[in-house]
Amino acid sequence: MWAIELRELSFSYNGQPVLGAVSLAIGRGERVAILGANGAGKTTLLKLMGGTLRPTRGCVTIMEIPIESLSRRDVALRIASVPQVFTVPFAFSVREIVELGRTAHLGAFRGLSAGDRLAVERALDLTGTRNFAKRIFTELSGGERQRVVIAMALAQEPQILLLDEPTQQLDLAKQAEILDLISDLNLSKGLTVVAAVHDLNVAARYFERLVFLHNASITMEGKPVEVLSPELLHKVYGSQIQVLRVSEESLPIILPLPESELRRRQVSGPGGKKEN
Amino acid sequence: MRNSGSSTSRGAERTFLLQVSILLVAFLVVMIFAAGAGAVAISGREVLSIVWSHLGFAHAPPYWPASDELILLQIRFPRVLGAALVGAALSVAGTLFQGLLRNPMADPFIIGTSGGAALGGTLGVVLAARISILGFGAVPALAFLGALAAMVVVYRLSRIGGQTPVVNLLLAGFAMSVMLSYTMSLILILNDRLQLNTRVVYAWLLGGIALSRWSQVGVIAVLVLLGVALACAFGRSLNALSLGDETAQQLGIHVERHRAAIIALGAVLTAAAVSGAGLIGFVGLIVPHFLRLIFGPNHTRLLPLTALGGATFLMLADLISRIVIPPTELPVGILTAFIGGPAFLFLLRRTGREYRF
């Protein structure tokens, strides 16, 4: 059974096509990264999966159910999202934010039940946010905030977790922490994870399947070792990147290539082009 | 300001009950004091005794002059309770707009909702003077339509890509208020030439508690109590909406429906307040802001707390405006402008530094 299935999905914004006839099936318990250049439509694809955007054509099914036949609440009981930008205008405490993850489970007047409290505590524990649960969200550091937003999404007890650039603006150690957390949730709880990721090396390390968006459609998808070829990467990102590979089985390392270096290689003739 | 947060949910509930109790005590104390103060001073003990006997608890024969009882029950209490209702309505409307617009600067007066209500209300007064069947009910009804229309227009104008920046909101609200206020002047001038008495309308627009009869207080009370009760049901969705429309949607809120309901509720409350007391500014701004600093931003608790706090605040302001330069009564709108204006400017300066959108 597919967790998410996209069939011939198209989306236009102000008449400009962003995605054209994209089809993709994501299995339960998979860990998938969506990649592509800036403006390739990664965020749009996630929003279509989460139902906050409606496709111009095509359809999205969640656990075999067409998303448009589900209410907002029913969608929220299955899918949680961690947005790229998360601003809080008032001084909510961390616990208050995480409790908001229970919104779909609650009525207007009913307070949190024992089950709701348990879900909140579990989310705080899983994300390691319990020790600063009393603090004000806006006073936290970037890494702490990201953990809280993930905790809120987990309190929702979803089967699918969508993340938009979960590690942007974090230092390397913090990136590893967040990505390990996401991988653990996927492996131990069977949570289906789909993330838009900017950093190719991060995607290759932490995700089992990569999906490349280019020219409004999926150019290539598969396991990191299989798809991260210099040919594909040059096609998607242009010539100014370098793909280094220690051995045939190992993951490639992808770096930006300075223009001076690029020019030097072009001058030195075909021999210089043979990087791999 | 706030460091306790909510350690456990049980503890938070106890804290909330304590906060409500404190505000309730403040409310009752101010009410008794405000009812007693005036040209004929009535002591707090006497006020309590009179109320007590009217609730059917009295055993001893009355020791107070009958005129005191008449003044208290027919003049003071309608006025004091009217002020309380108007204060609660404005404060809850302010809290609703601030949560919905994710903007601590939103206030029914500043964003033009009060202006819309005032224009509608003026039309109501003018029409009611001509077509007598409409009666007092025409004023709140037209005020509601005016408030709703002004709110919707300002909201649409100031919204850009799902956000409502402070500057856009203030500018759109300002332009709307000015247009509405001059339209109102035009109506009054035209009406004056037709030799209708417009002095009443002018006095009302300045923001004085115009409720002097129990029947008027009754109409406003029904609207305000119903509006506040319904508003409290939206506490949770306001919490979600203050994280942004998209996040609220992802949390399971039907954003469009909830937004429409919250705007309508804000318009009802503003209309009720303006019908009863004309244009009173800044109450919806400073009361929620102040209480949010003390009690935290959680709307499920903030909404009932602002209702109580706003009621207490306006009763107090009305009391001061009645007794500050006797025998003249200042319109309470002047007083709230003198307190609220500087508070608003102070907040606006702080906003530049603290709130980022």
Image (cartoon, coloured by chain):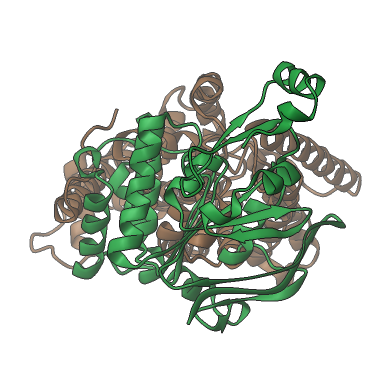
Give whichever of B229, A67 is nearer the camera: A67
Q: Is residue B100 above or below residue B320?
A: below
Q: Residue at x 56, y 28 (%)?
A: B334
Q: Depth check: A247 or B149 in front? A: A247
Q: Residue at x 48, y 76 (%)?
A: A74
Image coordinates for residue B217, horizontal then vertical, percent = 48, 59
Residue A166 location, x and y as percent? 47, 44
Q: Position of residue A232 (x, y in %)?
A: 69, 49
**Image quadrant of residue B269?**
bottom right
Which residue is located at x 69 percent, y 67 percent?
A54
Looking at the image, can residue B303 be seen?
A: no
Instruction: Give the quarter of the image for residue B10.
Output: bottom left
- Residue A157 visible in the shown view: yes
Q: In front: B175, or B59?
A: B175
User: Of residues B57 and B180, which is closer to you in this image?
Assistant: B180
Q: Which chain is brown?
A: B
B317 sits to left or right of A199: left
How many labels sit on residues?
0
Q: Residue furthest left?
A: B60
Quadrant containing the C terminus of chain A is top right
State the green chain. Answer: A
Query: Residue A158's spot in the image, x, y percent?
Result: 39, 67
**B321 horizontally vs A112: left or right:** right
